[in-house]
Image (cartoon, coloured by chain):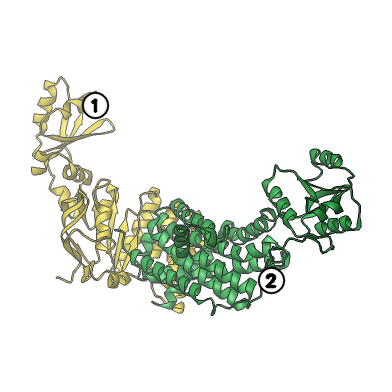
Amino acid sequence: MKFAQIFAVMLKELRQMRRDRMTLGMMVGIPTLQLMLFGFAINPDVRNLPTAIADMADTAGSRALAQDMLATGIVRQVAPARTPQDLQALLNRGKIKIGIVIPQDFERRRLDGREAVQVIVDGSDTSVQATARQLAAMPLDGGSGLRAASISVLPLYNPERRAAVNIVPSLIGVILTMTMVMFTAMAIVRERERGNLELLITTPVSSAEVMMGKVLPYIGVGLIQTTVVLALGMTVFSVPVRGSLLDVYGAAMLLIVANLTLGLLVSTKAQTQFQAMQMAFFLFLPSILLSGFMFPFDGMPVAAQWIAEILPLTHFVRLIRGVMLRGADLYTLWPDVLALMAFTAVMMTLAISRFRKRLD
Amino acid sequence: MSTDLAIRARGLSKHFGVLKAVDGVDLSVPRANVYGFLGPNGSGKSTTIRMLCGLLTPSAGEIEVLGFDIPQQAEALRRRIGYMTQKFALYEDLTVRENLDFLASVQGLARAPRRARIDELVEAYDFVDRQKQLAGTLSGGQKQRLALAGAIVHKPELLFLDEPTSAVDPESRRDFWEKLFDLADAGTTILVSTHYMDEAERCHRIAILDSGRLVADGTPADLTRALAGRTLGVRAPEPRRAQAALHATPGVLSVAQIGNELRVLTVAGGDAAQLQAELRKAGIDAEVSAIEPNLEDVFVSATHHDDTARAA
């Protein structure tokens, strides 16, 4: 393998990339858009629900309880109310999603252990309903020290229960998985589709050199994408980086290389750019669903877990959450590092053995 | 193993499943020659060229190109051959100069000689004002010229051209062929496939392929001379009717109308008087005379799908 030849292919690739404004825009646009979508719009945690509280007891205890509820940040008082009928009317008009009724005999009910507070929910949105149930299950005692539920969930690492903290690190992986496989596969298939490859294979450049030269620029692209997501995540969503930044990039690098080799393998199979794109998406879907990015890994059936173990994104999600949220380093997370390396080695071997410098 | 041959192939065959794309072809291409490859679409021209430069593995037969055994030594051959594909294979989103620069780098030229060589080519191939133009925006003729410049950037001894002028206007074609003869003069061997008779006419030697088989091989002059006496011109008041009658006449291989005259190729020893008599029997009063055969006649007689005709 000669560096001069790899460099020639690389320079050509960079020049082509520079002219392809569309793709260039996508490289930065995809991570930005996805981050905003997942960070802001697709937020499984419901907060700031418009609420009204009808405190008919109006005692020190009831007022303290209402304050506690507001302090969770889940509900936000938007309108005054005196009676359950007021709440009903506000709900009907869509002014509020949640109404909280504190009955006149609140103190007595609490002492008796009966239901002391009623939460009326706009049940049309299930996630709001679920949130209201959570709220009702909270051990809010209004500072009285009485009858607080004994079981409570203590959310470690993300006490504010903000989804962004959990999503942003894995989102780096999702974006890299989506773009890296597709970009490399398409870049190589494009050469075949446009007939460039037929010319290239009559020249002395070797298949390994072509592959290296085509893939190296995309490592740079991947690192830029990582930086974009990381920078936006830290500034816009105040996502912490508790581990070292070097480990973050180390993990990103492992995933980039794994995905590039997968892209190479796809390119040896796909005949057209359209096929390459389809195959990239075909591989992307299980990554999204099974990697633990969307659904907790431990909740999945064993078979799904096995499939997930093959996917590079699964290992990256573990690595990056470990590094960014728990402050771990790559050394202590070695099983996942090793898994990504093994994946890369296998894919690279398969790709090079399949990428023939012949047409038949 | 003679050294004055650039290409020597024996019994070259390529099967794709049951299809025999190339079937037992023997080829000898002398050095510093322009060697033409003729044949209808699908006759195996491209497949043969691809096998000769090691892109496809032959199903059978042996190939020796510039003294290398192909496909075993294909990698070593690559530095010494140039290949121009049927389709424009350079990068449309790179400029003229970037394309040449890329090909020169890939061919292993170091920076300084690379720049000198590209300057030379840009000058010789008339791209001085277009160095920074994107290849995709060039005209058909300019693209072919650029592709040729790209194929010879490393000064190959042997050049394969697969229908290089199929989408180019006549003037550009003529310019292109002038460039080919310049190269041949400088000692480059050129194997070029084409559809065009006027191009075939200009080659030092030609081979005609039909359905994967080599059906004629020689200099254009020899091949046309072999047809002497078999071509006849027919003048008749109603050429279309005469043509229909001629098709039914035994011994007639092909009839082509050229203006008001019909050009008739016969199986062997076409007798003008006899043909005239045949036409009179069909009620056509025609004037028949012997005419000089040309390469198109060679092509028609060689690729005619009639077993008795081929035997003749």
Q: In this view, does A148 lie to the left or right of A202?
A: right
Question: Which amino acid type is shown beneath numbered disc 2?
Answer: Pro
Q: How many labels does the image show?
A: 2
Q: How far across and how far down the image is residue B65, in percent?
A: 22, 67
Q: From the image, tell me which residue sits under label 2.
A: A240
Q: Are marks 1 and 2 on the same chain?
A: no
User: Distance from label 1 to label 2 (Cα)?
Assistant: 90 Å
Q: How far across and how far down the image is residue A41, in percent?
A: 69, 53
Which chain's colour is green? A
Q: Is residue A357 above or below residue A131?
A: below
- Residue nearer the viewer, A329 or B101: A329
Secondary structure, mark 1, is: helix
The color chain B is rendered in: yellow
- Residue drawn at (84%, 60%) of the image: A142
The quadrant in which residue B236 appears is: top left
- Residue nearer the viewer, A279 or A213: A279
Q: Which chain carries label 2?
A: A
Q: Is residue A11 left or right of residue A119?
A: left
Query: Mark 2, residues whose alpha carbon is within 10 Å: few (<14), some, or many (≥20)?
Result: some
Q: Is residue B277 above or below residue B124?
A: above
The quadrant in which residue A320 appears is: bottom right
Q: How far across and how far down the image is residue B310, in percent?
A: 11, 43
Query: Mark 1, residues whose alpha carbon is within 10 Å: few (<14), some, or many (≥20)?
Result: some
- Residue nearer the viewer, A161 or A344: A161
- Residue A107: numbered disc: none
Q: From the image, tell me which residue sits under label 1.
A: B239
